[in-house]
Image (cartoon, rainbow, N blue to C red):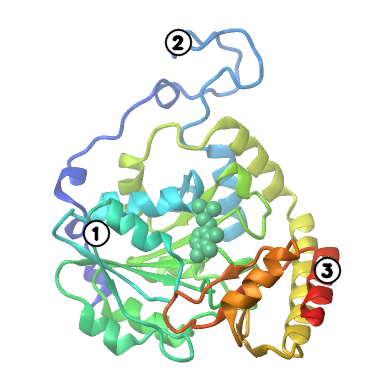
Amino acid sequence: MNKTQFNINQLVRQNVLGLKPYSSARDEYVSDGSKMIFLDANENPFENGVNRYPDPQQRNLKSVLAEQNGVAVQNILLGNGSDEVLDLLFRAFCEPKMDNIITLPPTYGMYKVLANINNIEEREVLLTNTFQPNVSDILDTVDRNTKLIFLCSPNNPTGNSFSEENITQILNKFDGLVIIDEAYIDFSSKKSWIEKIKTYPNLIVTQTLSKAYGLAGIRLGVCYASEEVISILNKIKPPYNVNELTQKRALKRVLDSDQVKIEVAKILEERKNLARILSQINFVEKVYHSDANFILAKVDDADKRYHQLLSMGIVIRNRSTQPLCENTLRFTVGTPEENEKLIKILKQL
Ligand SMILES: *Cc1c(COP(=O)(O)O)cnc(C)c1O
């Protein structure tokens, strides 16, 4: 398709197209910093730090993220974890019982769960043996009701990144929206696709503070896309979807990017060490290359090894039920001390 003719309004659900976003008290009056008396939102007036509603547009946090990522504030939507962001995409673009989406197993389980919740057909096109998207099969699976294709890169649970060529082909040849889930991008040597949202109006990039930023507990997901896509999502997001504590804590952390980099560098060092040692363990048959903070390994008997580790106090993820992942285990990279314990136990088994 000629992307200059791309028209997002042809992809939006009819009922969403006509919606006006709910206008909250905090939308109608935006503080300019001067001292005002707020009698507009039925809040309890006694200060305790969180008695006021949070900023529905999360302006402070977005402006830092915009600057760090070379985009405008209008290119960003924040959610209660990426899970909420992904759900908003279904609700904005997929008509229940009519539209469909494509996922590429083995991959993150939430795409399928959200498709099922929203009553959207999920079409699965397996990755190739090298865990790359099978572009021709994907394009053959697309029909006029295919709205979204989910690409997870680096992919969970395989750990690898998808090639630039494969992703570019999908972006160019698919008329719907392509979501690249970059939950693990900070652990990868590859560049983020964020800068390409200017080139591809059908590209949506999602990131999260749950992994490299160490804030899984506060729930903050980030969506980068064209202003047109973001304004559609803004129409349907709950007004106060990112709470005050989360906005404050996230802001503090993204401003402390040096500390994040230090932690990521340590995790990468540990990943390298763990991959090397795993490959020497006698029951490990293959260690897959990882661009993430976990390592997928093929073993002789995944159920047996999983339960052995569990009985020794170590919880990993058995990924054997996933296609192409028979007898695989996924190890998240822990602290040096945790990894040391894991290694000691692996060597004893
Ligand atoms: C962990 C993970 C996320 C994070 O989701 P949040 O809701 O932001 O915590 C998103 N995508 C993938 C592929 C993940 O593995």
Above or below residue 52? Residue 19 is below
Task: Specify few, some or many for label 2: CA neighbours under 10 Å numbering under 14, 14-19, or 20 or more.
Answer: few
List x then y, in percent, for residue 222. 50, 52
* Residue 25 sits above or below residue 334 on the image: above
Residue holding disc 2: 42
Q: Which residue is mark 3?
A: 341
Q: What amino acid type is highlighted by mark number 3?
A: Lys
The verdict on label 3 being within 8 Å of ligand 1 is no
Quarter where residue 36 is shown: top right
Question: Disc 1 marks which residue?
Answer: 8
User: Hey, what amino acid is under mark 2?
Assistant: Asn
Q: Secondary structure at mark 1?
A: helix
Of residue 122 and residue 185, the one placed in the foreground of this image is 122
Residue 293 in sight: no
Is 27 drawn above or below residue 105 in the view shown? above
Mark 3 vs mark 1: in front: 3
Earlier in the chain: of badge 2 and badge 1, it is: 1
- Residue at left offset 61%, top offset 73%: 330
Residue 323 in the image: state x and y as whole percent. Answer: 41, 80
Q: Quadrant of the C terminus?
A: bottom right
x%, y% of residue 150? 37, 69
Q: Quadrant of residue 86?
A: bottom left
Residue at 65% across, 78% down: 189
Tell which of 275 and 263 is nearer to you.
Answer: 275
